[in-house]
Image: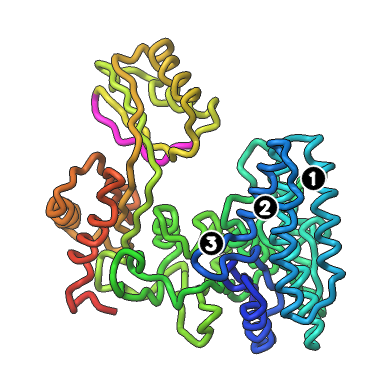
Amino acid sequence: MKVCKFGGTSVANAEQIKKVASIVKSDKTRRLVVVSAPGKRFPEDIKVTDLLIDLVNGVIAGVDYQERLEKVVSRFHVNAVDLGLDDTIIEELRRDLNTRIHYSIQISEQYLFDTIKACGEDYSARMIAAYLNKIGVKARYISPKEAGLIVNEAPSRTMAIDEAYKNLAALKNSEDIVIFPGFFGFTKAGRLRTFDRGGSDITGSILAAAVQADVYENFTDVDCVFTANPKVVNHPSEIQEITYREMRELSYAGFSVFHDEALMPVVKLGIPVHIKNTNNPEAKGTKIVEKRNVNPHAITGISADAGFSILYISKYLMNREIGFGRKLLQILEEEYISYEHTPSGLDDISVIIRSHQLTPEKEERIIKRAYNELHADDVYFRHGFSMVVLVGEGMNNSTGLAARAATAISRTGANIEMINQGSSEVSLAFGILEKYEDTILRSLYEEFFAMAAYAN
């Protein structure tokens, strides 16, 4: 049994949806299908999720939002017409959007955002189920609420609870193909909550674990995972097989092919993930597995991601003070801020944070508390950083990698602001200024992959 998920580009328009239907029909073991909201049809296009966010912003601003609502409806209407479906689903969408807006705004802005954003995936699934039935494929739309995808309560990060897996296991007994919307679930109290952007990957992984699928297929718009971002590096080599740990590290640091949180459910059961291309389903793709054949090369891939800030704190004899790190992280926890890395010295510590979590008000409070409660000598934030990460299971058996990487970075004229290596020695991260990100990525690729010996 296979669970397959189709991303936004795979369901962007009628032509793509027909490809999805063909892929599902071609393999009888594809019984559970998770879909995203329609993505971009062309580079200048706007994703449906972004149209929905714009709609919510209009509601909150108190402006006439009907024009924004009709933009969303129009995207689905075009697909419905091109698929030969009647207007019933479109009228339902229009009514549902207005109902959700009027109901949700009375609760909270966050609930409004979650409820409206989820419409993209919800109606994408309804439409695809309707089209499959139209062409003679027995399929049914099932909502996460009906299926029992129960998530935790706010404000904690949205995650499926154990009970959800027990509920969802029943889906494997469905006689029809199940079309399931990604990106959201419901609390026990019945409140809709969304996962992070890209959360349809998470939904697919949860379903794969729940039904103990043989494989979780994740269809996107590229043939495979590459060793580096093909938008930055010309013709990077392909990765045919990669471990869970390697993929987790690469996704965390900028690989957009697969959501980094989506691996957790399938890792526990050792279910392989297969990245495939909707536009070229015959391509081999990339398999994400627990263990793979020995790679003769230490580095599997290089990724980079911008949008990091550094909280720097110094205090003389910090290393002698018991509980300093705990107290510092407690301050961040109370501001609902997670951290990425904490490189430190005897008298100073840096905390790497995703910048989107910060506001000027939060920064001011953190700095004030660090002085008053930790009695720090110096505290400040720095912004505009990227993390460039080398990833590979073979790194712990190789010498000189850090030196080679540092040399490659130095050739660009950039300064290394921070170096951090995890205890597992699967990754080596460099903090650099954002403006050097692409140049450094190309230099590192040249160092570790450009030679013929490293070609796949």
Residue 297 is one of the magenta-drawn residues: no
Q: Earlier in the sequence, mark 3 or mark 1?
A: 1
The answer to which quarter of the image holds residue 431 is top left
Which type of secondary structure does the marked residue at label 3 adopt? helix
Which numbered dot is residue 101? 1
Q: How is the image coloured?
A: rainbow
Q: Are marks 3 and 1 in contact (CB under 8 Å)?
A: no
**Separation (CA) of disc 1 from disc 2:** 11 Å
The three-letter amino acid code for the residue at tag 1 is: Ile
Residue 343 is one of the magenta-drawn residues: yes
Query: Horizontal placement of 263 versus 391: left or right?
Result: right
Which numbered dot is residue 290? none
Crowding around mark 2 (Cα neighbors within 10 Å: few <14, some 14 to 19, many 20+) is: many
Which type of secondary structure does the marked residue at label 1 adopt? helix
**Separation (CA) of disc 2 from disc 3:** 33 Å
The three-letter amino acid code for the residue at tag 3 is: Val
Find the magenta span and give its range.
338-346
Locate residue 271, reporting x and y percent.
56, 69
